[in-house]
Amino acid sequence: MTLARSSNALTETQFVDRDTYVLRSANRWYRAEINKNCGRGSDRGRPVVFKLDSVGTIGKYSEVILDEHRLCRVEQLDRIEPPKNQHR
């Protein structure tokens, strides 16, 4: 699965745990899991950057920058229902 830039890019990123983020693109929600333990010790308060590939998408193996210097990879990207505390 890929998250296309043409779908209004990322509008929200939520930290779930050290290896999991919930992403919003327009009115679609995704769960992104990064490589195991890559997020260990990262500062949850700092923004993360999901790098787009050459065609403007985020997908499996896309790069994620944590703490400005740590580079992780997306290992799983799944479309999900909106989190319970969010509206469509």
Image: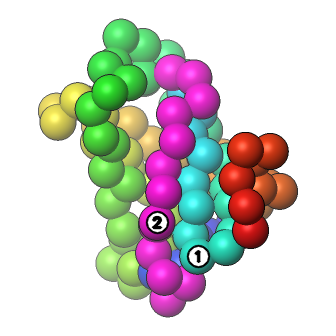
Q: Position of residue 37 (x, y in %)?
A: 49, 17
Q: Quadrant of residue 3?
A: bottom right
Amino acid type shown at disc 1: Ala
From the viewer's side, name the closer residue of 11 and 53.
Answer: 11
Q: Which residue is mark 1?
A: 26
Give the residue drawn at x 52%, y 42%.
14
Q: Quadrant of the C terminus?
A: bottom right
- Residue 87 as seen in the image, left or right of residue 15: right
Q: For the residue labelled by badge 1, is the local secondary structure a helix, a strand or a loop? A: loop
x and y percentages locating residue 10 in the rendered image: 46, 66
Q: In this orientation, does residue 61 appear?
A: no
Mark 2 and mark 1 residues within 8 Å of each other at the beta carbon: yes
> Magenta segment: does it hold 15?
yes
Vertical comparison of 26 with 29: above or below = below
Asked which secondary structure carries label 2, the reply is: loop
Numbered tag placed on residue 11 in the rendering: 2
Q: Quadrant of residue 44?
A: top left
What span is in magenta? 6-18
The disc label shown at residue 59, or none: none
Q: Report whether 46 appears left or right of 50.
A: left
